Image: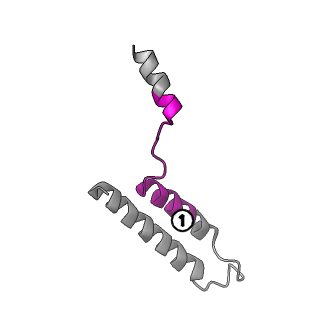
């Protein structure tokens, strides 16, 4: 894992922790339902973590690799 990916993963953890803090904050306005902003932070943190862990990298299949080699000739 590169240092940029580790920084991105740390930022994702910070965003998720911020979402937990925002969600758990006791506010009478929310009436026990939590915060919509916290849910948005959860989603953003999850997407950042998935990207940092490399699950969004493009990995061509064997058939795609073969087709690219055939086109290159």
Chief secondary structure of the magenta span?
A: helix
Q: Is residue 4 above or below residue 18?
A: above
> Magenta stretch: residue 73 in it?
no
Which element carries disc 1, helix, strand or loop? helix
Label 1, on which residue? 41
| Left or right relative to 30: residue 12 | left
Badge 1: how crowded within 10 Å, few (<14), some, or many (20+)? many
Residue 21 picture location, percent across and down: 52, 79
Q: What residue lies at 63% left-to-right and 73% top-to-bottom? A: 35
Q: What residue lies at 41% left-to-right and 56% top-to-bottom? A: 52
Residue farthest top in this picture = 73
| Left or right relative to 61: residue 4 | left
- The image quadrant that residue 5 belongs to is bottom left
Looking at the rendering, the stretch of residues picked out in magenta corresponds to: 41-65
> Magenta stretch: residue 50 in it?
yes
How many discs mark residues in the rendered view? 1
Residue 10 picture location, percent across and down: 37, 66
Query: Where's the N terminus, which quadrant?
Result: bottom left
Q: What residue lies at 48% left-to-right and 52% top-to-bottom? A: 55
- The image quadrant that residue 11 belongs to is bottom left
User: Is 37 in front, or is 56?
Assistant: 56
Q: Is residue 71 above or below residue 4?
A: above
Residue farthest left in this picture = 3
């Amino acid at each position: 894992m590169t240092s940029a990916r580790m920084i991105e993963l740390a930022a994702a953890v910070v965003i998720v922790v911020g979402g937990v803090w925002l969600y758990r904050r006791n506010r009478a306005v929310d009436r026990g339902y939590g915060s919509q902003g916290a849910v948005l932070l959860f989603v953003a943190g999850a997407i950042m973590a998935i990207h940092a862990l490399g699950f969004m990298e493009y990995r061509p299949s064997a058939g795609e690799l073969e087709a690219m080699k055939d086109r290159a000739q």
